[in-house]
Amino acid sequence: MTLQGLNFWAILAVWVIEMVIGSIWNSPLGFQKFWLRQTGIDITKLPTAQSNRAMLGVTIGTLIQVLVLAVLLNAMGVTSVMTAIGVACLLWIGFAASSSIGPTLFAKQSWTFLAVNTGLYLILYIVGAIILTVWH
C-alpha cells in the first residue's frame, strides 16, 4: 500500500470534520451526561494536564484513523458511495465494535454504553468514507 494517489486535502478536511462530530457527540448536546452517569467521570473537571493529554491522544488517533481509511479505500479502488459505506460498516463491526465488547463488559458497562461509544465510530467511518470517496 502506498500514499500515492491520496487526496491530502480531503484527509485534512475529514480529520477536522470528525473532530467536530466527536466534540458534539461528547458534549452536553450529545452524550456527555449519559457518559458521566455511566462512568462517574466528569471530563470537564479533569486536571488540565490530563485533559490535554487525552485531547492530544484523540487528535492523533483520529488523524491515524482517517489516514488508514483513506489508504484502504484507495488501495481497494473504491469509487462508489455505496461501496464506501459498506467498507466503513465492515471496518466498524470488524474492528471498532467487536474489539470494544470485552473492555465494555469487563468494565461492567451496559450494551447501551457500548452502542453509544462505538456508534460514534460508525458515524465517523461512514462520513469519512463518503467524503474520501467523493473527494478523491
Image: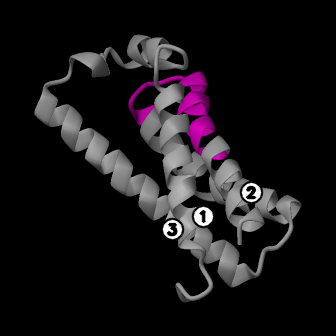
Indicate which disc residue 10 carries: 1
Proximity of marks 2 and 1: CB atoms separated by less than 8 Å: no
Q: Earlier in the sequence, mark 2 or mark 3?
A: 3
Q: Which portion, as a residue range, is magenta?
A: 105-122
Instruction: Quadrant for the C terminus, please.
Output: bottom right
Residue 51 vertical position relative to residue 64 in the rendered view, above or below? above
Amino acid bearing label 3: Leu
Q: Residue at x 30, y 41 (%)?
A: 55
> In whole angstroms, how far apart are the C-alphas of marks 2 and 1?
11 Å
Q: Residues within 10 Å of mark 1 (few under 14, many from 20)?
A: some
Amino acid bearing label 1: Ala
Q: Secondary structure at mark 2?
A: helix
Q: Residues within 10 Å of mark 3 (few under 14, many from 20)?
A: many
The number of numbered badges drawn on the structure is 3
Dominant secondary structure (helix, strand or loop) of the stretch shown in magenta: helix
Q: Secondary structure at mark 3?
A: helix
Residue labelled with disc 3: 67
> In whole angstroms, how far apart are the C-alphas of marks 2 and 3?
14 Å
Q: Earlier in the sequence, mark 3 or mark 1?
A: 1
- Label 2 vs label 1, nearer the camera: 1
Indicate which disc residue 130 carries: 2
Q: Residue at x 46, y 21 (%)?
A: 27
